[in-house]
Amino acid sequence: MAYVILIIVIAVLGLGAAGWLLLVRPRRAVTARPAPPSAEAEAGAPRAAGGDGDGAPAVSQVRVAAPEIERPPPSAGRLSALRGRLARSQTGLGSVLLNLLSRATLDEQTWEEIEDALITADVGVTPARQIVDELQTKMKVAGSHGVDQARTLLRAELLAQVGPAMDRSLRTAPHAGHPAVLLIAGVNGTGKTTTCGKLARALVGDGRTVLLGAADTFRAAAADQLQTWGDRVGARVVRSDREGADPASVAFEAVKEGIAEHVDTVIVDTAGRLHTKTGLMDELGKVKRVIEKSTTVDEVLLVLDATTGQNGLRQARVFAEVVDVTGIVLTKLDGTAKGGIVIAVQRELGVPVKLVGLGEGPDDLAPFEPGAFVDAIVG
Ligand code: GDP
């Protein structure tokens, strides 16, 4: 009898232990796992809740756990990979033009509609006129105008306007023992700081060492935002711990440290508030001059928001008066059907679009390729 009781006790204890292992242990293991990163952190460097830094600093909340150093993909061929985004935003223009060009009779009114469609897509009045003139002549010569032929001729005309022969290379390689220096300018909200971060990632993906200079000392969150981008790819950020510090001295220090550390590329983010236009523009010129005391500035990239149309062109004019812009970064091309801005802004400034932003994701920045861009428009 005593044996029977002993066996029952052992069985009950055994079942209890098994139940504890099955039910309690796993739950503890799940709760011990770190929380997954927020969608915002996944998508890219976060902004402060208040937009321009007026609100609670969301940045520090997201940076609770130091991110692991990532290995971003290289930049080559990104535009083709992201072509779906471009195509989605440009479908309107391409299909409208092809529908009009495939009409049985191409009368004066149809050509006016074609010109209007181009102008609506921000191509600009003069280039729109040129495209229509060329198409009129070529379609007359060709005789027929089926949709395939219309597409071929339209593609050739748009490509000619985008300028396939322009030099769009970015000077990011070190020279004479000094890093290449890239100055990033633009109005707040255009995606300037995000572009600095994405570009640093792309360069690291291409095998370069990068140092970031947070010379946008006016926007409280900008340096934190840049720090988050830098931390993710192991790029050091030179910043001031004092808000409103002299941007030129931060830029100078960043370049000095970049030279001392033998990095390949230094990317300097600058402040951009157009409402204080004169002072700020003078300051941008000063930042450049101060850097040039120790080395050359290899690129001055102007960041423009593609969704702002004529306003973006006005910004471009103002910036070009102060610094020699060497290339344009057109952001938010994923959010507009007005890709014609590529043609208009290059014409306005006489400098090429070198990079395009196609989303908020960390790798949604691509070297601009005219062929892939035009293909996305005409399908
Ligand atoms: P800054 O004030 O010019 O430095 O602007 P930010 O870099 O802070 O960017 C402003 C907002 O634009 C952020 O929400 C970015 O995620 C967003 N942004 C930047 N580039 C792109 C882009 O190419 N596409 C989209 N959809 N959003 C972008």
Image (tube, rainbow, N blue to C red):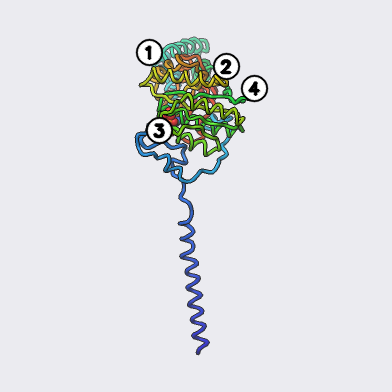
Q: Earlier in the sequence, mark 1 or mark 3?
A: 1
Discs 1/3, front: 3
Q: What element does badge 2 sit on?
A: loop
Q: Quadrant of ligand 1?
A: top left
Residue 221 x/y as whole percent: 41, 34
Q: Which residue is mark 2?
A: 165
Nearer to me, 327 or 300: 300
Amino acid under label 3? Ala
Discs 3/2, front: 3
Q: What element does badge 1 sit on?
A: helix
Label 1 Cα neighbours within 10 Å, binned few <14 / some 14-19 / many ≥20: few
Q: In the drawing, does residue 114 fall left or right of residue 162?
A: left
Label 3 Cα neighbours within 10 Å, binned few <14 / some 14-19 / many ≥20: some
Q: What element does badge 3 sit on?
A: helix
Q: Are marks 1 and 3 in contact (CB under 8 Å)?
A: no
Amino acid under label 1? Gln
| Position of 338 relative to 34 (above/below) | above
Residue placed at 45% from the left, 45% from the top?
A: 64
Give the distance between the C-alpha atoms of the residues marked 4 and 2, in whole angstroms: 28 Å
Give the distance between the C-alpha atoms of the residues marked 1 and 2, in whole angstroms: 33 Å
Q: Which residue is mark 4?
A: 176
- Residue 103 visible, this angle: no
Amino acid under label 2? Ala
Q: Which residue is mark 3?
A: 220
Q: Which residue is mark 1?
A: 109
Give the distance between the C-alpha atoms of the residues marked 1 and 3, in whole angstroms: 53 Å
